[in-house]
Image (spheres, rainbow, N blue to C red):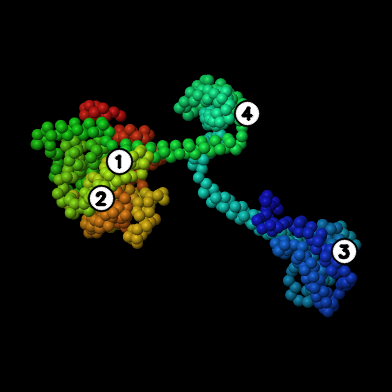
Amino acid sequence: MAVKRGAGRNNGGFCGLRLPVILLLFFSVLAPLLFLTGRGIHFRDSTDQKDVTSVSQISNWRERLAMQHLKPLFSKEVLETITANTQDLEPWSLDNMRKHPLSSSWEVGGLEADQNKTTLNEPKDTASDAAKITSQNKEENVAKAGDHSVLADTPAKQQRRRLREQRREKRANQLVHQDDEAIIKLENAAIERSKGVDSAVLGKYSIWRRDFENENSDSTVRLMRDQMIMARVYSSIAKMKNKLDLYQELLTRLKESQRSLGEVTTDADLPKSAPEKIKAMGQVLSKSREQLYDCKLVTMKLRAMLQSADEQVRSLKKQSTFLSQLAAKTVPNGIHCLSMRLTIGYYLLPLEKRRFPRSENLENPSLYHYALFSDNVLAASVVVNSTIRNAKEPEKHVFHLVTDKLNFGAMNMWFLLNPPGKATIHVENVDEFKWLNSSYCPVLRQLESAAMKEYYFKADHPTTLSAGSSNLKYRNPKYLSMLNHLRFYLPQVYPKLNKILFLDDDIVVQKDLTGLWAVDLHGKVNGAVETCGESFHRFDKYLNFSNPKIARNFDPNACGWAYGMNMFDLVEWKKKDITGIYHKWQNMNEERTLWKLGTLPPGLITFYGLTHPLEKTWHVLGLGYNPSIDRADIDNAAVIHYNGNMKPWLEIAMTKYRPYWTKYIKYNHPYLRNCNLNE
C-alpha cells in the first residue's frame, strides 16, 4: 500500500518511528539483553502443563529483568513507541523466541514467523486447541528444517495472511490519518498566527515586493519606482559619508526617472526613453552598492522611509475623509442656482396658478401613496419621474412631498412646470406643521438645547483638516433638519391613509412598485430590506451596548435594515404606538449615550421586532460608497439607493453608477441650462 509522504510523523519525539527502526533497536539492544538474561537455561518442547507453567514464569521474570535494564537506556516516549508499534507483532517474549528462531525468520523473509505470530494471537478457548496448535507448529518447523524453500499454502495460512495484511493496512491508515490531523492542526495554527500580522501597508514599498494579482502587470513601472526608492536611500547615505560626486549623480538620475515616470501607472504610458533611464539608474545604483552598501544602514534608511510613508498615508486618508464628508453635505452651485430661480418664478405666479390638480386623491386610501421628504429639487424630481415612468397605472399614484420653507417655492414651481403625467402630487412645508414643536417632539427640544449647539458649533472645533474628520459627519445639516426625523410621525402627517411607501431622495425607481402594497407584513409595522449580509450591519454597529439600557433590551447580533424604501402599515403603527416608543427612547438619549445622531439607530430601536424583511431585489443599496456592486444585482433591482457620501448629483459620484440617475433628468430644460447643470 502506498503511504503518502510524511505518513507516521508527528510532533511526539520518537512516536513516529517506523517498524524497521524498531526492529533495529530490538536486534541491537534488546535481543542481546534477552540472550544474556536467558543464558544457561535450556527450554525443551513439552506439552506437560507444569513445564509450560515453569517456562512461562521464567520467561516473564526474564522479560521484567530485561525491561529493567532497558528503562535507563531509553526515554519513556521511546518505550511507549516500541509498545505501540509492536502490538500487531505480538509482545516480544522468550517463549516466542524459543518457538520461532531468528534464523528461520531471516531465511524466509520473516513470513513464517509472522504466520506463527498470527496463530499465537488467535483465541485459545480450550487446552486441546492449544495442543493442536503446538503440534501443528512442530510439524511446520520439521517441514522448514527439511526444505526452507517450500511453503505449504494451506487455507489456514491464507486466512492468517489475509488477517495480517488487514492489520498492516489498518495500521498504515491510522498513521496516515494521524499525519493528516497533525498537518491540519499546523495549518490552522499558522492561519491564526497570520491573522495577527497587519500587511495592509507593510511590503508595498519594498524592492522585493510581490504583486499577487498579476506578477507581470506593469513590471517596468514598478521597477522604476523601486529604483527611485533605492536611489533616495543611497543618496542619503552618500551625503552622510561626504561622497558628494556620487550624491549629485544619484540626484540627477533620480530627477530623470521622476520626469519619465510622472503620473504614469501602466507600462503602456511610459515614454520611449524609459528603458534608457532604467539602464542609467541601474548603473549608478550598482556603483553606489559597491561603495556605500551597509546592510544595517540601508535597513535603517528603508525603515525610516517606510514609517514616513505610512504617516503620510494616514494623514491623507484623514484629509480625504474630511473632504468627502464636506463635499457630501454641501449643495452644488448648479442645484442652488436652480432652487433660487425656481423660487423666484413661483412667487411671481398668481395664487390661482399655484395649485396642483387632482387634490381629491390626496386622502384616498385605495390609491398608492408615497412619502418623500427632501430639500433637493433635482433629487426629488428624479424619484418622482423614475417612479411614474416605470408605473403600470400612473393615475393611481399619489406623491406627498414635504420640504422646508427655503425650498418650498422651488419644489412647487418645478412640479408645476413639469407635472408627473396623470399622477397626483402635493407639496407641503414642514414649518407649517404647528403640532411639530419642542414640547411634543423630543428631538426638536434637544436640537434647540444649549448642549447641542455647543456640540455642533463650538466644542472641539477642528483646527486642521485631519483633526475634524472624525466628528464632521455628525455635523451634517441633515441631522439638524426635522425633515430627517419626520419619518417617525407619518400617521400624524397623513391621518387618513392606511399604508404609505416611504422613499429617500437619493434613490432611483427602476420597476413598478405597486406589488409592495400586496406584501403581507404579518402584523408588522415596517417592511424593509435587511442589510446584515455583513457583520458590520448588525445592531452593535449602531447602538452602544456598553449601556445597560441597550444591553438589556436588544440583541447585538440582530439584523439591521435599510431606510430608503419602507412600506409602513399606518393602522398597525397607531395600534402599537410607534411614535410613543420613539419618544421614549429619544428622551433617554438626551446625552447621546445610547447612540449618536441620525435616524437609523432610533429606527432600529423603535421598530425592533416589528420589521418584516422584504426580498433583496426590491432594494439594492451601496451605490454611494461601494464600487463593486454586481451589475446584475443593480439591473434586477426595483429600487437602487445611492446611500453614502458619493451622491449622484455631486462631483465625487462614482461615474459607473451615475447614468442610472441622470437618465431621468432632462438636461435641455431651460432652468437647468441657465444654471449650467450638464450631464
Q: Distance between the residues labelled 1 and 3?
A: 96 Å
In the rendered image, the vertical position of residue 427 relative to residue 66, given as above or below: above
Image point (72%, 57%), residue name: 17
Which residue, given by chain and number where applicable, does mark 1 sit on? Answer: 507
Q: Distance between the residues labelled 4 and 1?
A: 64 Å
Residue type (three-letter) at the residue carrying disc 2: Ala
Query: Along the line of sight, which residue is nearer the eye, 25 or 565?
Result: 25
Q: Identify the disc placed on residue 676.
A: none
Any part of residue 496 in sight: no
Residue 440 in percent (x, y) is at 18, 54
Most distant residue in the front direction = 242
Residue 98 in percent (x, y) is at 84, 68
Which residue, given by chain and number where applicable, does mark 3 sit on? Answer: 143
Which residue, given by chain and number where applicable, does mark 4 sit on? Answer: 291
Query: Along the line of sight, which residue is nearer the eye, 250 or 495?
Result: 250
The quadrant of the image that shows the C terminus is: top left
- Crowding around mark 4 (Cα neighbors within 10 Å: few <14, some 14 to 19, many 20+) is few
Q: Which of marks 4 and 1 is nearer the N terminus?
A: 4
